[in-house]
Image (spheres, rainbow, N blue to C red):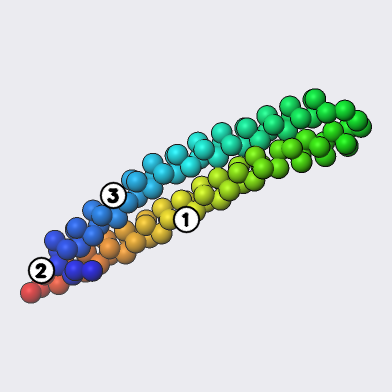
Amino acid sequence: METTPAGIESELREVIKQIRMGVQALNEAETRAVKLNDEADRIEWRSYITNQGTIKDREALAKLEAADARLAADIARIEVNRVKAKIRALETESMAISVMAKQVAIEWQKG
């Protein structure tokens, strides 16, 4: 990282750009997770309604038939959490860069 005011400003702009992209990625990941979860629910309920047997049997069969869709929904939720973690890391990085910028500004004013 460059310790000149221009270098720090450039770094901060890049982190802010990445945060904006992260927010967009989070929106897309959340939308995907909701859609996949809804699809898993639809598969499970459709299976429950169409299967024969006791309530327990129908529930078990429905869960089994929706397993792949439920796995996809779970993976999508994991992706949402990873994007959130990345955004938090970028926010922390931007705060660190801001502190560094303030320190460099003080040093440049002295010298």
Comes first in the chain, label 3 or label 2: 3
Which of discs 2 and 1 lies nearer the camera? The answer is 1
Q: In which quarter of the image is residue 28?
A: top left
Callout 3: helix, strand or loop?
helix
- The residue carrying mark 2 is 109
Looking at the rendered structure, the number of numbered marks drawn on it comes to: 3
Q: Which amino acid does label 1 sit on?
A: Ala
Looking at the image, tell me whether mark 2 or mark 1 is earlier in sequence order. Answer: 1
Q: Quadrant of residue 50?
A: top right
Residue 65, horizontal then vertical, whole percent: 74, 37
Tell me how far mark 2 sits from mark 1, CA to CA.
Answer: 36 Å
Nearer-N-terminus badge (3/1)? 3
Asked whether, in this view, residue 1 is left or right of residue 111, the answer is right
- Judging by the rendered image, the residue that carries numbered circle 1 is 85
Q: Distance between the Cα atoms at labels 3 and 1?
A: 16 Å
Q: What element carries label 1?
A: helix
- How packed mark 1 is, by other alpha carbons closer than 10 Å (few <14, some 14-19, many 20 or more), is few
Residue type at tag 3: Lys
How many residues crowd around disc 2 within 10 Å: few (fewer than 14), some, or many (20 or more)? few
For label 2, the SS is helix
**Residue wearing tag 3:** 17
Asked if residue 64 can be seen in this view, the reply is yes
Decide if residue 17 is on the left or right side of residue 63: left
Cβ–Cβ under 8 Å for marks 2 and 1 = no
